[in-house]
Amino acid sequence: MIEFLKFAFDFFLHLDKHLADLLTNYGTLTYAILFLIVFVETGLVVMPLLPGDSLLFAAGALAAATGKLELIILIPLLITAALLGDNVNYFIGKFFSKQIKSRERILFFKREYLEQTEAYYEKYGGQTIIMARFVPIVRTIAPFVAGAGSMQYSKYITFCIAGAVLWVAGISTIGYWFGNIEFVKKNFELVVLGIIFFSVLPIIWQMVKPKLSSK
């Protein structure tokens, strides 16, 4: 277990090198590997800790550095992976909806959390689906909760598509533009940690906010 955690941590911090190795060893099959990682992160509610934002950034940077990955292929491919994952997650949530609502807990979902999230969706609308796309863990759980709750699919899919396009195209393009900058190349671990930090800020804020309000 410790060895796996070490490998996972190293993989996160040195995504640029690991993706470059994948590209060297597997060539165009790298597209399929990236597709699978994005699909699993967004489609399986039990796999929320896979790299998402940093993976897209690294893939964009690798496309700029090597020319062996084409952004024009990468972006629509990974948008498709994200959408497929979201839809699988949504319908899994829909399938388990009655069980969650009839019990106090199923897996790590409590009924009260589902009710709170439904109220949040009702108050702020489907744009929360777009915002959730940019927050690790939340982007994996949000489609499941939307399916398990009362959000209609026609409403969900519209915001789901918008979120997938903005997320994949935005971050991979930023990686393509900035990944070749010398500072970024030499300090990729710091860049990855920065991406992770800024993407989890909303989670930290939601944890701290009630404590500040009570004071």
Image: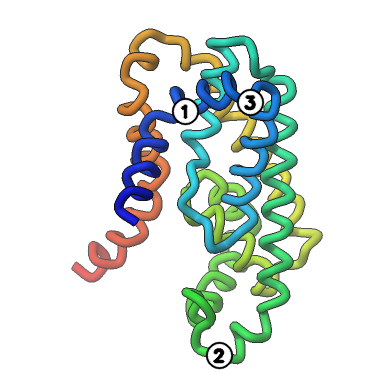
Image quadrant in which you'd find residue 168: top right
Could you tell me the amino acid type at mark 2? Arg
Given residues 57 and 211, the one toward you in this image is 57
Mark 3 or mark 2: name the one nearer the start of the chain: 3
Report the side of 86 relative to 183 (left or right).
right
Image location of residue 59, percent across then percent down: 56, 26
Which is more foreground, mark 1 or mark 3?
3
Image location of residue 149, percent across then percent down: 65, 74
User: Where is mark 3, residue-wise?
Assistant: 26
Image location of residue 44, percent across then percent down: 61, 59
Given residues 65 and 100, the one toward you in this image is 65
Could you tell me the amino acid type at mark 1? His
* Labels 1 & 3 near each other (Cβ < 8 A): no
Which residue is pictured at 67% across the width and 39% down the height? 35
* Labels 3 & 2 near each other (Cβ < 8 A): no
Which residue is pictured at 38% across the width and 40% down the height? 196
Given residues 3 and 136, the one toward you in this image is 3
The local secondary structure at tag 2 comes to loop
Q: How far apart are the alpha carbons under marks 1 and 3?
A: 12 Å
User: Where is mark 1, residue-wise?
Assistant: 18
Which residue is pictured at 40% across the width and 37% down the height? 12
Mark 1 or mark 2: name the one nearer the start of the chain: 1
Circle on res. 103: 2
Q: How far apart are the alpha carbons under marks 1 and 2?
A: 43 Å
Could you tell me the amino acid type at mark 3? Tyr
For the N terminus, give its image quadrant: bottom left
